[in-house]
Each structure stands twice: as structure tokens, then as C-alpha cells.
Image (cartoon, rainbow, N blue to C red):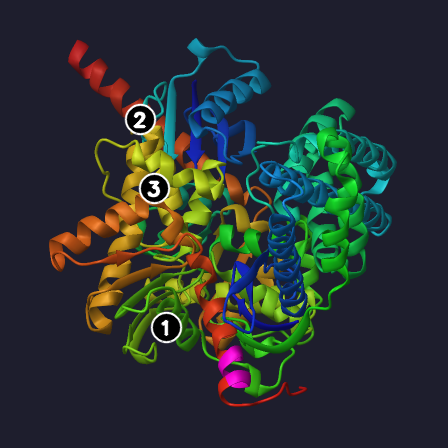
Amino acid sequence: MRCFIGIDLGSTTTKAVVIDENQNILGRGITNSRSNYDTAAAIAKQEALVNSRFHLFRQALGQTGALNGALDGFLGQLERDFRAEQYAEQLVDLGDTCRRSLATAHFGDASKAVGEALDEVFRRLQVDAPAQFAPGAKRKSDFFRDIAGSQYLAAGEAVAKEAGIRYDFLLNLFDRSIIEVENRVYGDSIKRHLLAALERAFIALPETASRRAQVEAPIKGILDTEMEETYTVGTGYGRARLPFSKEHIRSEILCHGLGAHVMYPGTATVLDIGGQDTKAIQVDPTGIVESFQMNDRCAAGCGRYLGYIADEMNMGLHELGPLAMQSTKTIRINSTCTVFAGAELRDRLALGDKREDIMAGLHRAIILRAMSILARSGGIRDQFTFTGGVAKNEAAVKSLKELIAENYGELTLNINPDSIYTGALGGATFAWRAVVEEGKSAEAR
Amino acid sequence: MTHTIGIDIGSGAVKSVLFRLEDGKEPQWLAKRCERIRRRDPMTLAREGYDAVMAEAGLAANDVDYTATTGEGENVKFATGHFYSMTTHARGGVFLQPGISAVVDVGALNGRAIYVDERGKVLAYKMTSQCASGSGQFLENIARYLGVAVEEIGELSKSSTNPEKVSSICAVLAETDVINMVSRGIATPDILKGIHLSMASRIVKLLKVTGIKTGTALVTGGLALDAGLMAAICEEMVNEKVTVTANSHVDSIYAGAIGAALWGGYRHRKLQELEERAAA
């Protein structure tokens, strides 16, 4: 089947969206961009295609009625088993890479003890792996770096203490190895992992095993369907480094404008708070950009600001919003620079201010910066669409609503739960237009 | 005989020192301790540092006459008094290397240049603020993204042959910039050296505006031990036509704490004199 793909190479995450010939969204994929950009694009696309297959599984199984009532449970199990299979492979890879890093490290006499500690850390990580993918398991994020990283740091700290070696050594091995592991695509193993996960799902849910044949047939059918990458459009911060010809690249401003328009056709103003820039865009009724403003090269006022604060607090990024929502008064944050705000946060904590109140202040600070960018781009018009990772944060949204009401009055605010994919969706729509409306075909670089 | 403790709470580490002061003698440095904060509570670390230097010197709490804090130590409950960082760094710098004309403190968050006279009196100073680009924290972040241990930074930087020029970049977003450099195939030493030069340029400019014309500047703070940064500062001094020589001291990181302990001793003596006069 023909697929149209948009890839948004952002600074923190790389997103991909796959749409079909009728502009229906088939799948979405996301990965962290800390690895090199070609790889990040390849992984995000691969994730989106895997997600598309799950979407098609659901469609096919829903039509046959083979799992009536048990469909959600089964697909959930299948996906968790699939993730667990992937994680296991990467964990083995990380272990091998760390051992290779150890061979070239300058740890002197400590090398042997560090090697033993490393083996112990990975033994513990293997033991803990299944629990990470149990139903309802809480994870800081779904990225391998984050799951394996937090497990590794915790196990590493304990093991270093027990073995009497320096924790820094273990940390250094991880830092040196993770990038290499992140940079591998594992494209060949997807089908194998899906089939292995299918077997595990049948074991985990014995009641489905009796209908094995009816379940297996459509799934294998979809696995054998080729998902033709008809046209791909790349966008985002790292777009210049994508392995595409110029025809396949659009600016992130254009893609965001169009993506917001596809999600909400009434959109007039778009605010996107991404990982490393904040954009205010005015679009016309067809989704084409009229004017825009952005802040660049400073983390204050971007998503990364909250990411940094989350790291400082040793919390997950998604935990910040709920914490700030519990606040009863907003503490004013004076620092602009993210690093200084982090220091101010520590001072405030030391002075006995409540965590939730400080958090509320930090959220308000980032929205205040956004409001000034919006004002410079021409203000907020109805309808107003808020996109990007920060749109998922309820405390940021709350601050935004308050400030809109104060400055612009009543208007419609659109927030899509998948708004992080706005740029990629715009890219996929450009890809679809290129082929279906303009009759273009894919160009090699 | 007076014993004083100086505790310098920075944003990256807590430094504690213990001094014995006797009339007519040079101050005697008995004990020191430096602990990286690493997201722990600085107040607890201050307490631990206090206990550790006393244990090292074999003293008990009532042997200590004055406990002075500096840096972000205003809220240390058990301290006798607090001194501002400018004065403590100036005093500590002059103790470490008598005869200097300036102290340049490069810490985890702030950088400051202090023009001093021979007794450690502050004549002029200039400090960075508002932006953490080029700070110690910034360098440490970059080292982590590059997978380089902090101790290796200096030597790697010195081995650079073709430093990659960086303009001032956001300390938080530096990660992406570094990824860009790595993906463009720039060698680790060249990245580090480029960053050192950018930091050094800020530092030298700070020093220049204090009005200092000649003499020696002692680099203090956690980054004074980074040989790569020191080399970059010396190069930048030449580029900026500042005829000041820069050097560092093995105990540079303790400058603030030393200054606090010495100023603590001074204030303690003044207080005693006042008491004696009141009694008489």
C-alpha cells in the first residue's frame, strides 16, 4: 500500500507520521534525537511504520471479530511484549558495548573491579527488565536511553557502593556506550520481535490461544503487506541533515502551520513550544503561513527549560505539570536563564517554599516568554492552536488560558493530544499533496 | 590562639577549611574538604564539611571560635557569620598567592573578576549574570555529552590542533550544538578547546573591564584546575592585549572558604576587642 511520510527532526525528539492515500493517519513514531540525525529519522520512521502495522492489526482483527471484546487487551499485551523483546536485544547490545568501552578506558588498577561491577549491573538489569514492561508499569519515558539509563544509574550506584569502586567509572562507561547503542537501527529484527511477541501474548493470555488460527492469519497477512514509502517530507531543526533531496524538505514553520490546519481547519494562530525553540505562527484559511516569530538558541521559554528543571528535581518531565497543578500560590521566578532558574529553584526549596508553588512559577515563566513572542507575531486570533510537547503539560496550558483571558478575552483554544506530531503531520500532508495533487515522484538525494 | 572555619557553598561544590590564627604568626591551614553537591542538600554537606575539618584537625566544637560562611551559605544555621563572595575570594586568593593583583573566580554558575590590592582589599569587580553560557556547569554538561571524564578535559583540550570556534551558546542547548559538531566530524579535543577559548574570552573581558593594567591574576574556583582552560585564558590575554599573567594554585578551589575563615578570624578579634573595651 502507498504510504506518505512526514518526519519532523526536532532537537529533543524526532517524530514521524504515516498517512494513507485518503489522508488517514496510519501511525505515529517518536524517538529521541540524541543519536545522529540520519539514525533518528530512520528510527522514527520505523517506529511509525510499526505503529501503522498495529493500527492495521486492529482494523483487520476488528473486522474478523476473532477477539470480540478482548481486542484491546490482546493488542496491548502484544505491544508490551514487542517492546520487551526490543529492550532485551538493546540491553545485550549495551552490555557488550560497555565491556568494549571498558577495554579502552583508563581506569588503571580499578579496571578489573569495574569489569566485575559492570557484569553485576547488567545481571541486575536483566532481572529487572520484565518488570519494566508489565501491565501498568510506570516508566519515565519509552526511550531505551531513559529506561536503561535510569535502571543503570540506580543499579550502578548500589553496585559501586557494594564493590567499593568509583561510581563515576560506571557512569563514564554508560555515557560512552549509550550513544553507540542508540545509533543502531535494529531494522531487521522488527518482524522477528513481532512474531516472538505474538507467541508470548498467546502464552500470557491463554484464552486467546484457542482462537490462534483466526488471530494469526490477519496479523501475518499484514506483516507480509509491503508498506511502500511513496513520498517522504522532512522538516524540523535538523532537516538540513536529513538524507533527502531538497524537494523533500520543508521548513518547520510551513509544516507546523499546515499540520495545525489539518488538525483544526479553523486555526488562525499557532503557538508551538518545542524542545529548543518557541514559534508563534499566523496562518491563512488554507493553512499557509502569513507571518511568524520565534525564539532561538536560548533554552529559556522552550520545552528544554522544563526538561532541565525535571532533571534538577530528579523527576520525569510528565510529572512536572501535575505537581504544579497542586499549587495554591504561584511563586515568581526572577531568573531568565534556565541554569539560573535551576539554581533559584534549589534556593527556593532550601528556603522552605513548596515544590508545587515553585513549579507553578516556572510554568508561568515559560508561558510569559511565549506571550511576548505571540504579541510580536501579531497577537492571538481566533482560533488559537497550541502544539508541541509543552501543550501536553496541563500546568502550562492553565497558565496560558489565564494569560489569554487577561490579554485577548474569550476565544477557542485547540489542543490535540497528539500535537507533538503537528510538524510531522504537516510534512506528511505536503508529501501527499506532492504526489496526489502535483503528480511528483520521489527524488534521490 | 583562634580557630576559625570557613565554608564556601557554591553551586557545584561545598568547600570547608579550618585555620589556626595566632598573633604575630602566619595563619596556619589545618584541614580542608571539598564535596561535590550532585543534587544533594548543600546544608547537609556544609554540616558534614564542618564535622570533617574538625575531625581532621582533631578539634571539638567548642575549640572553634568562629564559623564563617560565604557563597550561598546565608542560611547555614550553625554559622557565626556570613561574608560576601567578592571579599572572601579576594582575601583567599591573596593568601594562596601573595602579591597578586586580581582574582578571577570561575565557578559552576558564575564567573567574576576581582581587582585587589596587596592586602586583598577589593578595588573593582565584575561578574557574569543572567546567562550560564560559558560557566563550569556548562563545560561539565558538554563533557558528559562527549563522554569525557571531567579530569580528562584539560589534557584533551591542550592536544587540540584546530579548535572549533563557538560563539556563546546556551548552556542548556549546548547538547544539540555538540551533537552537530560531532556529526560534522569534529574531533573531541577541538570541540573542547573551542569551548575553552569561548569561556576564556568571556573571562578575560571581565578582567579587562575591572581596569587592571598589569600584574598577576590568580584563577580560583573549580575550573582553575582545568589545564585546558588555563592555557586558553593565557592565549586570550595575548589576543585581548591584556598584559596580565594568569596562573592557578592547586588549592584554588578553596579560595572562597579560606577567605571566609580569615575574615571570620578578623571579625572575631574585633568582637573580642569590643567586649574587652566594654568590660573595662
Taking A210 as reference, is A356 left or right?
left
Which amino acid, by three-letter code, is at mark 2? Gly
Taking A354 as reference, is B172 left or right?
right
Taking A150 as reference, is B267 left or right?
left
Q: Which residue is mark 2?
A: A352
Mark with earlier residue (1, 2): 1
Label for residue A344? 3
Q: Can the viewer see residue A334?
A: no
Q: Residues within 10 Å of mark 3 (few under 14, many from 20)?
A: some
Measured as percent of width and height from the top left, residue A261 is found at: 35, 70
Q: Which numbered disc, 1 or 2, marks the residue closer to the eye? A: 1
The one of A57 and A6 positioned closer to us in this rendering? A57
Q: Which residue is mark 1?
A: A257
Q: Quadrant of the N terminus of chain A?
A: bottom right
Q: Quadrant of the C terminus of chain A?
A: bottom right
Which amino acid, by three-letter code, is at mark 3? Glu
Mark with earlier residue (1, 3): 1
Q: Residues within 10 Å of mark 2 (few under 14, many from 20)?
A: few
B12 above or below A164? below
